[in-house]
Image: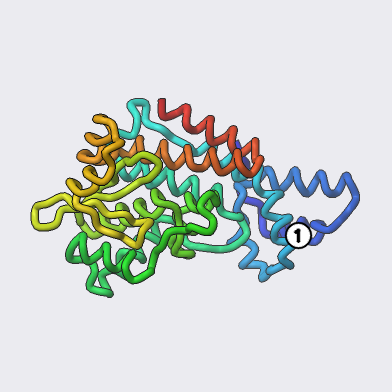
């Protein structure tokens, strides 16, 4: 288990030694940075340290082992699985966000960022219905599909997604889902082969929302008719909400695939370890 956060005074010393090329010094700096919690952003702000782009990247890489260990030790899966525990799902997604963060740039926690997004929706008269929220989040371009960097691991960092406004299908759906829950609106996730969608009710009829495609609406019957290749189980899955455990599994699968493609074997192995807790 990781130790306590580095004291600001010790961190100040380590920062001055970042560029030291002495093997013993470099090893000691790496050892001390790996012993913390992996995020020194608040301490850096307190110190007023900005650093060059190269220094910030080096520091982030040295903090990565600590972020891995923090994710591993704080990951908590209920013995019976997630069930319908959306709060626990949000907690686990926050851990993933903290792990994927650089540990150097200061930013809000995932819960705070989602709270502010819900407040933003209220201020823009988008909190009264699922349809109004859909328009605000996606039709306005507030959030859009990350087609240029579809396999970027940061698509699974929801704090980054809220800041950047881009993600993959399931990342955008999660923004819709968690914002809707804060506003007492009824939005559910829907599993789809190679994709992820949301479902809302409009005049008593189920409407499928493709958050990746600017929130495009599809009537369920029309969507099924457009995909005759779907098997019976796949067609039935569109009629029922995806549970938190299934959603988390898809997020972890995306991350595992991204890390494998980037040859980040240690990170891919960690994600595989986390997926085992879902079984």
Q: Residue at x 86, y 56 (%)?
A: 20
Residue 50 in the image: state x and y as whole percent.
Answer: 68, 69
Mark 1: which secondary structure?
Answer: helix
The picture places residue 225, in percent across and down from the top left corner, at 22, 44
For the point 26% across and 57% down, the residue is: 180
* Quadrant of the image occupied by residue 118: bottom left
Residue 28's quadrant in the figure? Answer: top right
Left or right, residue 256 beside residue 241: right
Residue pointed to by mark 1: 15
Q: Looking at the image, which residue sits at the far left?
A: 204
Mark 1, Cα crowd under 10 Å, few <14 / some 14-19 / many 20+, is some
What residue sits 47% from the left and 58% below the top?
146
Residue nearest the viewer, comparing 177 with 70: 177
Q: Using the image, determine if residue 36 lies above or below residue 107.
A: above
Quadrant for the N terminus in the image:
top right
Image quarter where the C terminus lies is: top left
């Amino acid at each position: 288990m990781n130790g306590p956060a580095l004291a600001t005074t010790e961190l100040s010393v380590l920062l001055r030694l970042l560029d030291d090329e002495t093997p013993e010094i470099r090893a000691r700096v790496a050892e001390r940075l790996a012993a913390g919690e992996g995020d020194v952003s608040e301490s850096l702000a307190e110190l007023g340290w900005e650093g060059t782009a190269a220094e910030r990247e080096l520091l982030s890489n040295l903090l990565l082992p600590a972020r891995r260990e923090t994710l591993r030790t704080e990951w908590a899966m209920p013995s019976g699985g997630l069930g319908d525990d959306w709060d626990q799902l949000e907690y686990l997604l926050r851990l993933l966000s903290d792990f994927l963060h650089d540990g150097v740039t200061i930013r809000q926690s995932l819960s705070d960022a989602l709270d502010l997004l819900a407040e933003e929706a209220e201020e823009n008269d988008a909190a009264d219905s699922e349809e109004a929220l859909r328009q605000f989040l996606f039709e306005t371009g507030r959030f859009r599909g990350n087609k240029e960097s579809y396999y970027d691991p940061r698509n699974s960092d929801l704090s980054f997604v809220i800041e950047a406004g881009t993600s993959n299908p399931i990342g955008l759906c999660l923004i819709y889902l968690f914002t809707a829950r804060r506003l007492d609106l009824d939005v559910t996730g829907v599993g789809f082969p190679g994709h992820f969608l949301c479902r809302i009710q409009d005049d008593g009829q189920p409407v499928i929302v493709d958050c990746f495609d600017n929130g495009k609406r599809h009537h369920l019957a029309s969507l099924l008719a457009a995909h005759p290749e779907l098997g019976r189980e796949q067609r039935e899955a569109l009629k029922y909400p995806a549970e938190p455990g299934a959603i988390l599994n898809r997020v972890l699968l995306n991350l595992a695939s991204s890390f494998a493609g980037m040859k980040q074997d240690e990170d891919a192995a960690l994600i595989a370890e986390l997926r085992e807790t879902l079984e």
